[in-house]
């Protein structure tokens, strides 16, 4: 019922990356947080889970990019991610940016087995970025340091984070799916992490 206007700029940045790398993508903006009174306010877990289900059932999405994360494993979100997988929908999620201060934390939904977890590489792409979560639960890494993004005002700047790496991987998956529309979910995952 609320507006899909991006009040914070993060969604705009993610969309700009996906469209730069997969220009034929059709994006459906589902807003999980808003910027109000100088604070980010996130929807509750059940609403977040319903957004994932709606992306599948209402909007017919083939790929869901989640450039956000929860510190706690929430049953409703876990079940929604599993549901998307059952329906053949790929969820790509960022792993988080706290490694330098809290290296042991696992963010969800990236931490779920059914989700493609994306970490960040440094700007040269030759090592894991200092801020990116890591571990055997991370499926793939992409450059996430000093990434070119668009801002709410339409300007261009650089920023860093695994959110941007996830957007790049979502774009790669979209391009693979465009070339191979009959591909199944497991094949899409495999080709995306190659």
Image: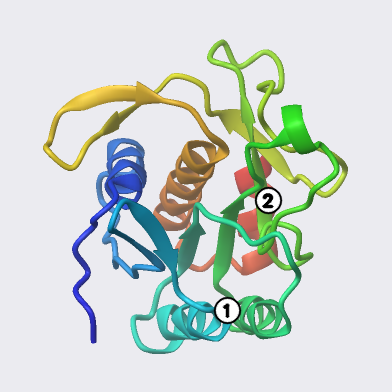
Whether residue 85 is visible to the viewer of this picture, yes or no, is: yes
Residue at horizontal 73 percent and vertical 83 percent from the top = 75
- Give the tally of numbered discs: 2
Residue at horizontal 51 percent and vertical 59 percent from the top = 66
Outermost residue, front side: 37
Residue at horizontal 61 percent and vertical 68 percent from the top = 184
On the image, which quarter does residue 86 sit in? bottom right
Q: How is this picture coloured?
A: rainbow
Residue at horizontal 64 percent and vertical 62 percent from the top = 70
Mark 1 against mark 2, which lies toward the viewer?
1
Q: Position of residue 170 (x, y in %)?
A: 48, 50
Which one is in front, 99 or 141? 99
Q: Position of residue 11 (x, y in %)?
A: 33, 52
Question: Which numbered circle lies on residue 45?
Answer: 1
Q: Residues within 10 Å of mark 1 (few under 14, many from 20)?
A: some
Looking at the picture, does residue 147 appear above or below residue 99?
above
Which one is in front, 21 or 105? 105
Question: Which numbered circle lies on residue 117?
Answer: 2
Looking at the picture, does residue 116 appear above or below residue 21?
below
Q: Position of residue 101 (x, y in %)?
A: 75, 31
Which one is in front, 9 or 67? 9
Whether residue 194 is visible to the viewer of this picture, yes or no, is: no
Q: How far apart are the two marked residues, 1 and 2, measured between alpha carbons?
A: 19 Å
Taking the image as shown, residue 101 lies to the left or right of residue 54, namely right
Q: Secondary structure at mark 2?
A: strand
The answer to whether mark 1 and mark 2 are in CB contact below 8 A is: no
Q: Secondary structure at mark 1?
A: helix
């Amino acid at each position: 019922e609320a507006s899909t206007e991006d009040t914070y700029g993060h969604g705009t940045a993610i969309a700009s990356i996906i469209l730069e790398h997969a220009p034929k993508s059709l994006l459906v903006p589902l807003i999980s947080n808003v910027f109000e009174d100088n604070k980010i306010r996130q929807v509750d877990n059940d609403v977040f889970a319903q957004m994932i289900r709606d992306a599948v059932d209402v909007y017919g999405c083939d790929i869901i990019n989640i450039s956000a994360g929860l510190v706690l494993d929430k049953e409703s979100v876990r079940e929604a991610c599993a549901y998307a997988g059952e329906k053949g929908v790929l969820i790509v999620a960022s792993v988080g940016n706290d490694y330098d201060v809290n290296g042991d934390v696992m963010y969800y939904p990236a931490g779920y087995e059914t989700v493609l977890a994306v970490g960040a590489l440094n700007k040269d792409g030759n090592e894991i970025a200092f801020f990116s979560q890591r571990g055997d639960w991370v499926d793939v890494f992409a450059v996430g340091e000093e990434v070119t993004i668009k801002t709410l005002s339409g300007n261009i700047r650089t920023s860093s984070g695994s959110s941007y790496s996830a957007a790049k991987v979502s774009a790669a998956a979209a391009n693979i799916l465009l070339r191979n529309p009959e591909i199944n979910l497991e094949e899409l995952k495999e080709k995306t992490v190659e």
